[in-house]
Image (tube, helix red, strand yellow):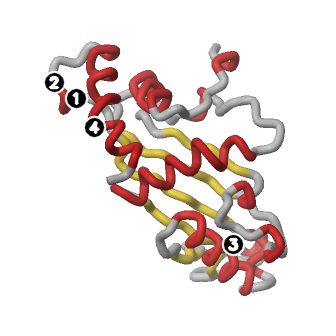
Amino acid sequence: MSRLLEQYNNQIKQDLKSKLGFKNVFEVPKIKKIILNMGIGEAKEDSKLIDKAQEDLTLISGQKAVKTKSKKAISGFKIRAGMPLGAKVTLRNKIMYEFLDRLVNIAIPRIRDFRGLNIKSFDGKGNFSMGIKEHVIFPEINFDKVDKIKGMDITICTSAKNNTEALELLKCFNMPFNENQRS
């Protein structure tokens, strides 16, 4: 069992139940899934960039990434329908908690000029999204073999009903939020 999952079941559930004033343990929010997305705009000229992005995302997540394709043609951007433009992977259960552990304890501290995650990045329904400008912050990526630094989006979907519940849940997992951005 993952270290974070064990910590959630033994400690975080009880803390959140008392902190949020729930009467039942099943009301306590939990993390449902984590989605990693890497959009590669330059892939329309070079299709090998998609393969490299898929390979990097598979290394980062520990699970095979899939290519994402355009849904419709946009002539202004020189995109045809069905053209591969990125890669994504959805993590659940054990792999999800292991990735979250590596994200919080290893990857986020390696971000340059990091001042905390933005509290305003919640969507109103308890889901949190963040963008990373450099995918090389993950230790699985060999910096010498990287031809181009790519950005990625990370979305953490929770079962929380609102942003405050989701914020408390993610704080219990030691996500470093910037408290000065509240307004």
Q: Residue 9 carries which label?
A: 4
- Percent of width and height locating residue 71: 55, 73
Q: Residue 20 falls in which quadrant of the image?
A: top left
* Residue type at the position of mark 1: Glu
Front tag of 4 and 1: 4
- Asked if the residues shown at circle 4 and circle 1 are in contact, with their CB atoms under 8 angstroms apart, the answer is no
Q: Residue 24 carries which label?
A: 2
Q: What's the CA distance linking mark 3 and mark 4?
A: 47 Å
Q: What's the CA distance linking mark 2 and mark 3?
A: 50 Å
| Residue ID at (50%, 66%) | 89
Left or right placement of residue 83 versus residue 14 in this view: right
The answer to whether 99 is drawn above or below residue 164 in the figure is below
- Percent of width and height locating residue 31: 37, 43
The residue tagged 3 is: 74
- Asked if the residues shown at circle 1 and circle 2 are in contact, with their CB atoms under 8 angstroms apart, the answer is yes
The residue tagged 1 is: 27
Q: Residue 88 falls in which quadrant of the image?
A: bottom right
Mark 3 or mark 4: whose residue is earlier in sequence: 4
| Residue ID at (62%, 53%) | 153
- Percent of width and height locating residue 44: 75, 80
Q: What's the CA distance linking mark 3 and mark 1?
A: 44 Å
> Could you say whether the residue bearing mark 4 is in a helix, strand or loop?
helix
- Asked if the residues shown at circle 2 and circle 3 are in contact, with their CB atoms under 8 angstroms apart, the answer is no
The answer to whether 118 is drawn above or below residue 82 in the figure is above
> Could you say whether the residue bearing mark 1 is in a helix, strand or loop?
helix
Mark 2 or mark 3: whose residue is earlier in sequence: 2
Q: Residue 183 falls in which quadrant of the image?
A: top right
| Residue ID at (34%, 14%) | 19
- Percent of width and height locating residue 176: 61, 31
Front tag of 3 and 1: 1
Front tag of 3 and 4: 4
